[in-house]
Amino acid sequence: MKRRYLIGNLKMNLASVAETEQYLVALRKELFGKRIDGVEIVLAPSSVYLERFSRELPDPLRLAAQDVFWEKEGSFTGQVSAPMLRDLHVGSVIVGHGERRLYAHETDTEVGWKMKSALHENLQPILCVGETADERERGEEVSVVSDQVRLAFHDVSPMMAERVLVAYEPRWAIGTDIIPESEQIFEMRIVIHRALAELYGQPVADRVPVLYGGSVKATLLERVCFEPRMDGVLVGRESLYPHELFRMAHEIGNRDDGRREADGNEVGGE
Ligand code: PGA
């Protein structure tokens, strides 16, 4: 069965070293005696805790950063570069998260630079795309998300493109507990797939996993992941609860719905 992903974005949470320690202890406790199959779990803590996570994150969980800068080094106060992340054994990095686009006014072009700096350092980008409530209101979601995909992948080779995970995160669903309908998610999955197929052709597009993110909870997996045939989820607030995280991992990993065949026909057939 095709691999699925569970990305935990811890955002600016775990407010102290002590809290971070407690979280890591709770993770290990929850993981104890469990087999993690069929799902890759990746956690993205704040950059100040990356080193600690890198030392203490239990196997087989993997580590991601929440952001990266596009230059390798130099006079860029406050930024963290891809080689710095690599040196800490970080494997993936979120780029273009809705909260970065909102609070740091990140543009699609900058997101593209970040993608390339990550890829050149052998980090797996987790590219977030998604329209705002206003854009959806105006019926612009298809063009907004297609453009975000095109600009982020600009100048990215097909071989490198296959290493990217794309997360469809409607901005109006992040942190709001407003949940899109399964059909809306599936529709945007097709939009993302089509934009990738235009850039790279169908076989490459078929190999790029597309996840859903925005107010995900274990009880919503059917609606936001399985029904719209997504390759996993990006979880924000709920990833602060290790018990819930592993509950989701178990459900996702054990779900065998014959997606592989269906994927080729339904999504790839677009
Ligand atoms: P949320 O965050 O699950 O808290 O809505 C999602 C995200 O970080 O993208």
Image (cartoon, rainbow, N blue to C red):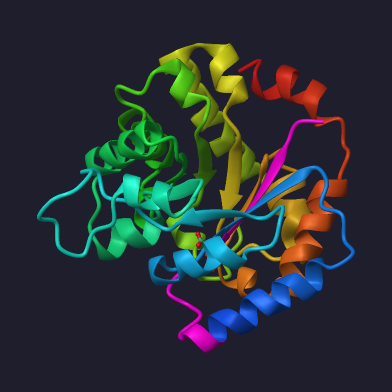
Q: Is residue 98 above or below residue 127?
A: below
What residue is drawn where x is 67% and y is 55%? Answer: 61
Q: Is residue 119 magenta?
A: no
Q: Is residue 103 left or right of residue 88?
A: left
Q: Residue furthest left?
A: 75
Identified at 13% across, 51% down, the residue is: 74
Give the number of callouts. Answer: 0
Q: Position of residue 55 (x, y in %)?
A: 56, 64
Q: Is residue 9 visible?
A: no
Give x and y (percent) for residue 255.
86, 45
Determine whether 98 is above or below 145 in the image.
below
Q: Would residue 88 appear left or right of 54 to someone viewing this image?
A: left
The residue lying toward the viewer, choosing from 142 and 65, is 65
Occupied quadrant, residue 18:
bottom right
Quadrant in the rendering for residue 70? top left
Instruction: Name the residue located 40 percent from the left edge and 50 percent from the top edge.
Output: 87
Position of residue 147 in the picture relative to residue 236 (left or right): left
In this orientation, does residue 209 appear?
A: yes
Q: Is residue 76 left or right of residue 170?
A: left
Q: Answer above or below: position of 171 versus 11.
A: above
Tell me where the magenta segment starts and ends, as one range: 1-18
**Can you say which quadrant of the picture contains the N terminus?**
top right
Q: Is residue 4 magenta?
A: yes
* Location of residue 130 in the rendering, given as x and y in whole percent from the top left corner: 43, 47
Q: Quadrant of residue 141?
A: top left
Q: Quadrant of the C terminus?
A: top right
Of the pair 52 and 192, the residue shown nearer to us: 52
Image location of residue 142, percent across then percent down: 43, 35
